[in-house]
Image (cartoon, helix red, strand yellow):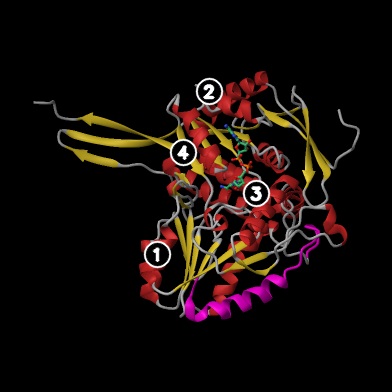
């Protein structure tokens, strides 16, 4: 066991109990200073087997609760999350490196909203009655069973909640496997669920390595895998899950376009581009990193954007004045910096940023200046690949039809943005874009009552909104004959 005493000791949660894992100890590092923040004890194969067994038994118990009872417990979860809002936000800011000016609302409130929303769905879930010749049929929405939820590191508490709330509302049980980089907050969620009255086995947390996670994706007692992660992992998990034909939900990467027309309100355009590129240090899958600006407003946009980006304050994620925090790991920072170098080498015009920030305490962490490239072309590496850091690529265009074609010329299809004051154009362009979610005159807003998810290589299935119910239930049809068949 390492000698350092980190701030958090993180356990696994199996069958309603917090347990140390039987496997190796792993350290979780604070991205803002690269000091050990938590010690995590990984679970063994035998322990993960135990989690599956208890999840299977717990699900049967939970499915017998009425929707009203399940909803009451999930509402209590929402209340407990809100009650502990600032402590949870602090954990998230430390673990992910994102500023405390974001986490209370974007991470913690979003999770509470999600439990509240799906509590209401649990209480009101109904099925169909269909009159047929000779009788009638009705449908029931049965839970799918045990759900393996695999999280990414950029929104750990929110991701765990967005998967757990709908799954539990529909009567499933969940085994949550967090990203190895952000293991802390999901254990806090386990404590809250237990306190709210969720029965043993209905929610578990397993800290396991990727090989064991891959193994679980093939487990015959797991009915569904819901993943948030990279496209490559999505393809691997889908193949693993296919061996026993499991349900899947895949929230993967993006390379989304944000289109600014010359009739745009430029304040809205700049604000949207800011949120689409520099919120959470740019580590957001829906980010609109390909910013297409119509020729007449191109120079004006770049000048305003430069001013706004240069005013962003980088620093300690726990300082309320900080606008942008640290990238998740040194390795990830190196990848982002390599993309910045490739932008320079391929001839994009650097407007601002373009390097790591190392003044004072920033040198201890993984801080990269908000970076804007202008005069980008569609073939550049920074225009094609997901960077997952604070790097905005700006392009110019003249005609609507041309920009729609260029915006859609990517294998990804997660999100898109349109900034215009022309009502018909806004709807027309939104309709033409190949994306799971399109924002008009705003960007990156994800209230829990709207469906969220990607098209093409960006994913399958939808989280949030009523649409999520379709991905956490199996429809059973019962045909009742009331007249004898001829
Ligand atoms: O994700 P991974 P990482 C993108 C972003 C980032 C890159 C890598 O571009 O730079 O992905 O991030 C588990 N079977 N996104 O390494 O590798 C893994 O342990 C079962 C976009 O975090 O995809 C982790 O818990 N599980 C994304 C989770 O999958 C497996 C947010 C994601 O890991 C597995 C984060 C396997 N074969 C990063 N391989 C988004 N959509 O927002 C990995 N895992």
Mark 2 touches mark 3? (CB < 8 Å): no
Residue assigned mark 2: 219
Task: From the viewer's perspective, tell me whether residue 185 is left or right of residue 160.
Answer: right
Tell me where residue 354 appears, x and y as whole percent: 70, 63
Quote the CA–CA distance across marks 1 and 3. Answer: 29 Å
Tell me where residue 10 appears, x and y as whole percent: 77, 35
Sequence-wise, the earlier of marks 3 and 4 is 3
Task: From the viewer's perspective, tell me whether residue 281 is left or right of residue 442.
Answer: right
- 291 or 112: nearer the viewer: 291
User: Circle 4 — which element?
Assistant: helix
Quote the CA–CA distance across marks 3 and 4. Answer: 23 Å
Residue 201, quarter of picture: top right
Sequence-wise, the earlier of marks 2 and 3 is 3
Where 270 falls versus 467 (above or below)?
below
Q: Nearer the viewer, mark 2 or mark 1?
A: 1
**Residue 267 is at least partly visible in this image:** no
The extreme top residue here reads 46
Which residues make up the magenta segment?
A: 293-320
- 5 or 293: nearer the viewer: 293
Query: Measuring 78% from the left and 67% from the top, which residue is drawn there?
Result: 321
Mark 1 touches mark 3? (CB < 8 Å): no
Q: Is mark 3 within 8 Å of ligand 1?
A: yes
Q: Where residue 404 is drawn, which disc sits there?
A: 1
Q: Nearer the viewer, mark 1 or mark 4?
A: 1
The extreme left residue here reads 486
| Residue 280 sits inside the magenta stretch | no
Q: Nearer the viewer, mark 1 or mark 3?
A: 1
Tell me where residue 4 appears, x and y as whole percent: 90, 36
**Residue 306 is at least partly visible in this image:** yes
Residue assigned mark 3: 154
Tell me where residue 464 appears, x and y as whole percent: 50, 50
């Amino acid at each position: 066991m390492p000698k350092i005493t980190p701030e958090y000791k993180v356990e696994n949660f199996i069958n309603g109990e917090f347990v140390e894992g039987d496997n190796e100890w792993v350290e979780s590092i604070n991205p803002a200073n690269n000091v050990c923040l938590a010690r995590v004890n990984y679970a063994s194969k035998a322990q993960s087997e135990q989690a599956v067994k208890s999840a299977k038994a717990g699900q049967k118990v939970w499915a017998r609760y009425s929707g009203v009872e399940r909803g009451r417990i999930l509402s209590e979860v929402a209340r407990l999350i809100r009650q502990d809002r600032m402590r949870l936000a602090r954990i998230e800011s430390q673990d992910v490196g994102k500023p405390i000016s974001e986490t209370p609302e974007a991470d913690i409130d979003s999770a509470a909203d999600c439990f509240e929303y799906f509590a209401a769905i649990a209480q009101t879930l109904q099925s169909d009655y269909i009159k047929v010749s000779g009788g009638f049929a009705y449908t029931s929405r049965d839970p799918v069973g045990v759900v393996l939820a695999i999280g990414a590191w950029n929104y750990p508490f929110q991701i765990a909640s967005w998967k757990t709330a709908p799954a539990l509302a529909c009567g499933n049980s969940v085994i949550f496997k967090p990203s190895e980089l952000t293991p802390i907050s999901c254990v806090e969620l386990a404590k809250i669920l237990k306190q709210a009255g969720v029965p043993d086995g209905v929610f578990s947390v397993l800290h396991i390595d990727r090989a064991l996670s891959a193994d679980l994706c093939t487990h015959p007692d797991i009915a569904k895998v819901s993943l948030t992660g990279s496209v490559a992992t999505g393809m691997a998990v889908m193949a693993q899950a296919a061996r026993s034909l499991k349900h899947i939900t895949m929230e993967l990467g993006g390379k989304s376009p944000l289109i600014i027309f010359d009739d745009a309100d430029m304040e809205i355009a700049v604000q949207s581009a800011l949120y689409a590129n520099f919120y959470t240090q740019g580590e957001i899958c829906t980010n609109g990193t390909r910013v297409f600006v119509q020729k007449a407003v191109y120079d004006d946009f770049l000048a305003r954007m430069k001013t706004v980006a240069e005013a962003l304050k980088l620093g300690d994620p726990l300082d309320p004045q900080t606008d942008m925090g640290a990238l998740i790991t040194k390795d990830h920072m190196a990848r982002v910096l390599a993309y910045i170098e490739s932008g320079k080498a391929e001839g994009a015009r650097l407007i601002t940023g373009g390097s790591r920030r190392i003044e004072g305490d920033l040198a201890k962490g993984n801080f990269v200046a908000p970076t804007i490239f202008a005069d980008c072309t569609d073939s550049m590496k920074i225009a094609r690949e997901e960077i997952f850091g604070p790097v905005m690529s700006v392009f110019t265009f003249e005609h609507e039809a041309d920009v729609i074609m260029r915006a859609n010329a990517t294998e990804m299809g997660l999100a898109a943005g349109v900034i215009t004051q022309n009502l018909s154009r806004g709807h027309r362009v939104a309709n033409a874009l190949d994306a799971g979610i399109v924002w008009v005159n705003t960007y990156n807003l994800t209230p829990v009552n709207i469906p969220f998810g990607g098209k093409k290589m960006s994913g399958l299935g939808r989280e949030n909104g009523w649409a999520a119910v379709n991905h956490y239930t199996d429809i059973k049809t019962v045909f009742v004959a009331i007249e004898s068949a001829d």
